Image: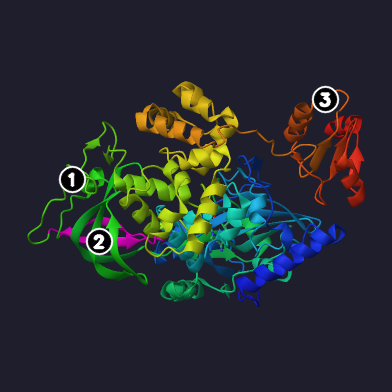
Amino acid sequence: MLDSPEISDAEYDTMMRELKALEDEHPELLTPDSPTQRVGGKPREGFVKVPHSSAMLSLDNALNETELRDFDRRVRDLLGGEEFHYVAELKLDGLSLAAHYREGQFAQAITRGDGATGEDVTENARTIRSIPLKAGRASLEVRGEVLLNRRAFEKLNAERMAAGQPPSPNPRNAAAGSIRLLDPKIAASRRLDFYPYFLFPAPATQTETMEALTSLGFKVNPHWRVCTDVGALLEFCDEWERKRDSLPYEIDGVVAKVDRADQQQRLGWTAKAPRWAIAFKFPAQQKETTIVGVRFQVGRTGTLTPVADLEPVSVGGVVVSTSTLHNQDEIERLQVQINDRVLVERAGDVIPKIVRKVADGNNRRPIEMPTACPVCGGEVVRAEGEAATRCINTNCPARLKESILHWAARGVMDIDGLGDALVDQLVDTGLVKNVTDLYGLRLEALVDLERMGKKSAEKLLANIERSRRAPLPRLLNGLGISFVGERTAQILAETFGDLDKIAAASEEELQKAEEVGPKVAGSIRRFFEERHNRSLVEKLRAEDFSFTYAITRKTGALTNLTFVLTGALPTLSRDDAKVLIETAGGKVAGSVSKKTNYVVAGEEAGSKLDKARELGVAVIDEARLLELLG
Ligand code: IVH
C-alpha cells in the first residue's frame, strides 16, 4: 500500500497544514508520532557519532554465475547437507540506515558510517514518510536502505541546475547527501524513501522478517522471493538484470540470504561480511560511441572543465550524449582525442564516464586546454600540483553568473525566482557586477527585463531583501570558497562565531575547526587574501549582513523549550540569562505566544506577564530558571 500512495503530494501537503493548524489551536492533542512532527526540527550544527548495537557489515560480492555457484557450494558444505532456502532480494542502490524504536516510537536513526559507529541523523530520517513514527509497541531496530527514486532524483538535479549547482552524479550520492543535510526542512523536500530488510529482535527466518516489517507498517520492497536452490537464485538475478530499468529506482544487483536464522548463526560471519549472504552484482552498463567534439565549461571558481560531446547512444535506458573529461590529467590518462571510439559506462551514475579508448578515429584531433578563457578571453592558469586549469579573472561573466546562482541557491541564500535566465540578463546588462549589487536592484530596472512582470519583480525583491537576514553559515557558504559547502560553513561559523575572525585566521588556526584539513584551510586563506574577495566582504558588511553567529548547543536541559524574559532579574542580566538558556539548548523569544513554554519574570515585569497569564503560559522566577538549568 505504501508503494502506491492513496493521495497526491499536494493533497498530503494540504492535509498537513490543516492538522498543523488544529494542533496549534489544541496543543494537548499533539502526539510525538503525529505526522507534523516529521518536519520541524531546527538546523543542526553537525552530527553526533553513535555506536551501532551490532556492526553494520557489508556483503561479499559475486560478479558472475561461477562466483554465485561457489558461494552456494560453500553454504551447502558448511550446512553439511541439511536442507535450506534462500531469500532473494533486490540490491537497492542507496545507503544503509539503522532506525531504532523505543516502545514502538521512532527514537533514533543512525547512518552506517564505518560500520561500527555512524552519525545520528534522527531529525532528517523523521522526515522520510516511509519510516513510520510508530511501529508496534515493542523496542526494535530496523535496518534498511535509504534511497531516492529516479523521479525525485531528476527533480533534485533540475533544481540544482536551475540554481547553477553541479548536478549530483547518481541517486545514491544524492540520497547520502540528503540524509546528512544539516537542515531537516531541506531534507524533507528531497522525498527520500526507506526500504527495510532487517529486524531486531530477529524472527526465525528472513521471510518472517519481511512479513513482520510489512505488518509493522514499513514499506517493504515487494520484489523478493524464496528460492529453493541456486538455479532459482540465478533465474531471479537474470530476471531483474533484464527488468532493472523498469523500476522507479536504481538497483545494482541481487542479495541472496540464507532464510533460517539458526542456519545463519551456524554459517557465521567473517570480519567484514556474513557467510550466509552474498551480493550478486550486475555488470556496469557499457556501450561504444564516438567523441565528436569537446567544449569547456567555466565554473564558479573559474575551473575549466572539458566536456566531451558524444554520438548519442542508449546505455541502460538512458540516452548519453555528453561525458565529463574532468581535467587535463584525465585526458592524458585516457589518451583520447576527438573522433576516437570510446567505451562509456553507467555504473549507477546517470552521468556516464568514459572508461577507455576502443580505437583511434579517422582524422583524430588532440584535445587542447584553451589558452584563454572561452567566456571572457581572460588569462587561464594551471597552478602547480593542481589538476584544474582556471580562469583567473574574478570578473569573468561565467564565474560571476555561477557565483550569483550559487548565492541564490536553496540552502544558501534561498532567493526564489533568481534562476539561470534572469541571472544571464542581470549580468549581461551590467546591472549586477557582484552579489551585493542584488541588494541595490530597483523595481524599475527589473520590470524592463525580458519575461519579468511587476508582480514577479516585486516578489523577487522581497526574496532578495529577506535573504539579508541569512545567518552566518549561509553567508559563508554563499561566498563560494572552494571546498567550503554547507557543512564546513556551519562548522566554521560555530567554531569562530565571527566572519572577521575566520577571514583573519591563519591556516593553523583554521585547522583547529573540526573536519578542516590543510586543503580546506589553504583554500579559505587564499580566498580572503584575494583583493576582490576582501572588497566583497566589505560590501557585505556595508549591506548589514550578520557577520557573527551565536553558538547554540544541540541538546541540553532546555532543548526544545522557548523562554521569554521580562522585567529585571535579581542577579542575571538579560544577556546572561539568554546565553545560559541558549547554551542549554533553549530558545529565547521576544514575545509571548502559545508556543512559549516559560516566561521568566523579574521586577517590574509588564505586559508580557499579563499576556502569559492570559494564555496560561507558565511564569517562573530566576531561581526556578536556575533550577531548570541544573
Ligand atoms: S543485507 C549483513 N539486503 O548493500 C548484511 N543489503 O553491499 C546486511 N543493500 O551495506 C546487508 N539492498 O547497504 C542487504 N536487500 C538488501 C540490500 C542491501 C542493498 C546494501 C546495504 C549493504 C550493502 C552491501
Decide if ligand 1 comes within 8 Å of the CB at mark 2: no
Q: Main secondary structure of the magenta part?
A: strand
Looking at the image, is mark 3 or mark 2 earlier in the sequence?
2
The N terminus sits in image quarter: bottom right
Residue marked by disc 2? 343
Circle 2: element type: strand
> Amino acid type of disc 1?
Pro
The C terminus is located in which quarter?
top right
- Mark 3: which amino acid? Leu
Of the residues under marks 2 and 1, which one precedes in the sequence?
2
Residue 613 place in picture, x, y as percent: 92, 47
Residue that badge 3 annotates: 572
The magenta span reads: 340-360
Q: Is mark 1 within 8 Å of ligand 1?
A: no
Residue at the spot 71% in from the left edge and 70% down from the top edge: 15
The residue tagged 1 is: 370
Q: Which of 556 and 355 is in front in this view?
A: 556
**Label 1–label 3 contact, CB within 8 A:** no
- At which x and y percent is residue 320? 31, 66
Q: Earlier in the sequence, mark 1 or mark 3?
A: 1
